[in-house]
Image (cartoon, grey):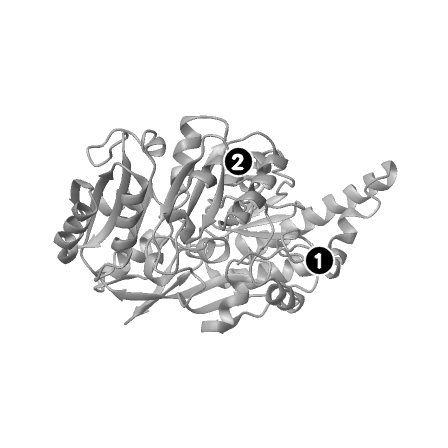
Amino acid sequence: MTTANLSALTELVADADSGPARNRTERRSRTGIEEFCAEAAELLGADGVIRDEAAREKASCDWAHMSPILAAKLPAGHADVVLRPTAHEQIPGLLALAHRRRIPVTPRGKGTGNYGQAIPLYDGAVLDLTGCGRILDAGDGWIRAEAGAKMSDLEAHARTLGQELWMFPSTFGTTLGGFLSGGSGGTGSLVHKTNSDGFVRELTVVPCTADATPFTARDADALPYIHAYGTTGVIATATVRLQQARTWTGLFAAFADWASATAALSALVSLEPAPRLASLDESGLVRVYGSDPALDPTALNLRAIVEEEAVDQARALVRSYGGTVLEVRPAPDGPALISSLSFNHPTYHLMKAEDGWFHLEIRGDVLLGDTTEIKQVFPDTLLHLEGMRSGTVGMLMARYQDEQTVYDGIAALEALGVGVHSPHDWHVDRRLDLVRETARTADPLGLLNPGKIPATSQETA
């Protein structure tokens, strides 16, 4: 948390290290929470103010347990209450109330983040936006919905209009607001890059101020609110971009060696019409995916979501690099399976099958070449790659030893030309100067998801 925002929590943590003083602070805090909850119930109704232990426990966790480093540190806070509005129009009243009562608020979608983005570090209220799930409007090239609308519902609605989303995350049931606030990319990123690269057309954002008046941020002005974990304001509605719907098919192939497989991946990425997704896995990952004739656990597996008209080109391309086409599986099953095995989902499958692994997000076309030195950094390294026109990204999975070994390994990978983003840190790590500047106005008391803006810049590319 920045020095400027520390004052927001002074009343909650002052004298916390001394016995009687700490008890007085806790009593003040309890009284404040009870009064806050009573007023929140006037805004939401009793059903919208959740106090039971199971709901508060669930709202205090996300998928940060996928990191052995974060699993030892989180959850660090515990929700005092879960607020569940059922319409975006209720959000301003709740944030004005939080501002008046000095109650920290952590906005949240379905809680599928992997870094502790949407869990409270300083107790207070968790703002569960999954009840705000209406699709509000759509037109040529755009769709507008509340923050709690599921990406899968947006895609389905767009399809009824002959359109489709530019992109959607590998966890297809993720909410729109959760994807924009804590996510990055997914199916469609091969061409359209991340959710901060033109995907957002317009946001309605609610600040945590005395009046909490919503405002509109369009195009580039929306950047301070994307991947900022709700620290710069709560996204209430979002308008994102659509494109003409296409007929997609899943292509599954197997290769015997890394050089051939990565050459084919690069060629598929450059194919016209462009694929929607192209992934490559080592056999050590494929073995934990379950039995399927489209997957070969003894080989490198290349999967791509290609347009129906490009299937013959894709088949020929695979064969030209010495690969074998395992199956061409049409929608919805083929593309759905490929999306479900993309980005961080291989990590999930590996960790579900076996204990003792950790992962890093990696990038750089150096990954397409000889990976011998890269794989010597950590024992038993496994690689998953995503083909992008903006450059190769992926996941590196390896056996976990201890936290320091992970960070020493990151430095060694970077020395080899591998870009690394650590999924073992809950801090905002993009556009930090812009996020800090925006938060000073949108959240002057530092009540929105406190503890997520680092005190010093540790920004990643």
The residue under label 1 is 2
Q: Residues within 10 Å of mark 1 (few under 14, many from 20)?
A: some
Q: Position of residue 222 (x, y in %)?
A: 50, 69
* Residue 205, horizontal then vertical, whole percent: 52, 66
Given the image, on which type of amino acid does mark 1 rest? Thr
- Above or below residue 310? Residue 422 is above
Q: Choose between 169 and 357: the one closer to the eye.
A: 357
**What residue is shown at x 42% (from left), y 56% (from top)?**
176
Regarding mark 2 in the picture, which secondary structure is present there? helix
Mark 2 touches mark 1? (CB < 8 Å): no
For the N terminus, which image quadrant? bottom right
Between 56 and 276, the one lying in front of the other is 276
Closer to us: 388 or 141? 388
User: As rendered, which of 117 and 446 lies closer to the eye?
Assistant: 117
Q: Is residue 331 visible?
A: no
Kind of residue sitting beneath label 2: His
Residue 150 placed where, x, y %? 37, 52
**Mark sitting earlier along the chain (2/1):** 1
Q: Say which residue appears at 16% left-offset and 56% top-offset.
A: 310
Rendered location of residue 120, percent (x, y) = 61, 46
Are there few (<14), some (14-19), or many (20+) residues within 10 Å of tag 2? some
Left or right of residue 386: residue 328: left
Q: Is residue 43 left or right of residue 374?
A: right
Residue 149 visible: yes
- Left or right: 222 as drawn, with respect to 299: right
Q: Which residue is mark 2?
A: 65
Residue at x-position 24% and y-position 47%: 335
Q: Residue 407 lies in what quarter of the image?
A: top right
Q: How many marks on residues?
A: 2
Label for residue 433? none
Q: CA distance from mark 2 to mark 1?
A: 26 Å
